[in-house]
Image: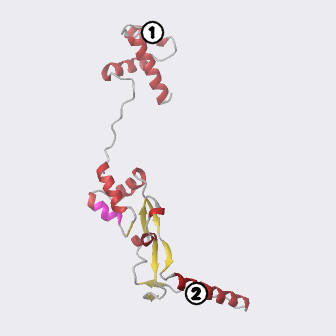
Amino acid sequence: MTRHEREELAKRVCNFYEDAANKSVKTTVSYFKKKNIPERTIRYMLNKYLVHGTTNFLQRTGRPVKITDQQLNGLVQAVNNKTGISQRQIAKRYKVHQTTISRTLKNRTSVVIRKRQKAPKMNDEEQEKRSRTNCGKLYRMILNGCDIVLDDEKYFGLSGDNVQCNKRYYSTDPSTTPSDVKFIKKKKYSPKILV
């Protein structure tokens, strides 16, 4: 039996108890027993009605939330459309564990953590000129029978864009996010180390 069906049955039992049975528990139980409803269920519903005065299912107590609704609004404002924010730092501010912050953002808010997209740090003219020349060079090299060689060298940038907390941002709606948060700006010749 679903919760809705139990509520409907409880209303029927209590209405019968009030109107037809003249507030007689014995009459109500015997009437609904004839309809193949267990006596224990009927008595439970009547007892609940007499104690609480309602047939509706009351809100059950559960584990209290660690972050209140007021704190939740502050949390959303603190992380929305921002980058470089660590959940551990936020957790220290609210005196909870990092997993609590992660679970709260996921389950109780519309904030989603997204990966920042890479975008070249140049103006429109430079970008257009660079794409024309580089695509042409690559196309001509492949036509001339040249092989493309891949090596296992790794460059580490010194601009801080390779730090994990700078690679993602929080946002409720990515269409309203400013472009300096959504994109990682990177210079063509930024300082780096070759390993």
Q: Point out which mark residue 30 bears.
A: 1
Relative to 65, residue 111 above or below? below
Farthest residue, direction front: 125
Question: As shown in the figure, which amino acid type bears the numbered disc 1?
Answer: Ser
Question: As shown in the figure, which amino acid type bears the numbered disc 2?
Answer: Lys
Is most of the magenta stretch helix, strand or loop?
A: helix
Residue 46 percent coordinates (x, y) = 37, 18
- In front of the other: 39 or 115: 115
Cα distance between the residues tagged 2 and 1: 90 Å
Relative to 188, residue 86 above or below? above
Using residue 140 as the reference point, say whether residue 184 is left or right of it: left
Magenta-drawn stretch contains 90: yes
Q: Point out which mark residue 71 bears.
A: none
What kind of element bears circle 2? helix
The residue tagged 2 is 129
Residue at left offset 68%, top offset 90%: 141
Residue 117 percent coordinates (x, y) = 50, 72
Circle 2 residues within 10 Å: few <14, some 14–19, many ≥20: few
User: Who comes first in sequence, dot 2 or dot 1?
Assistant: 1
Circle 1 residues within 10 Å: few <14, some 14–19, many ≥20: few
- What stretch of residues is rendered in magenta? 86-92
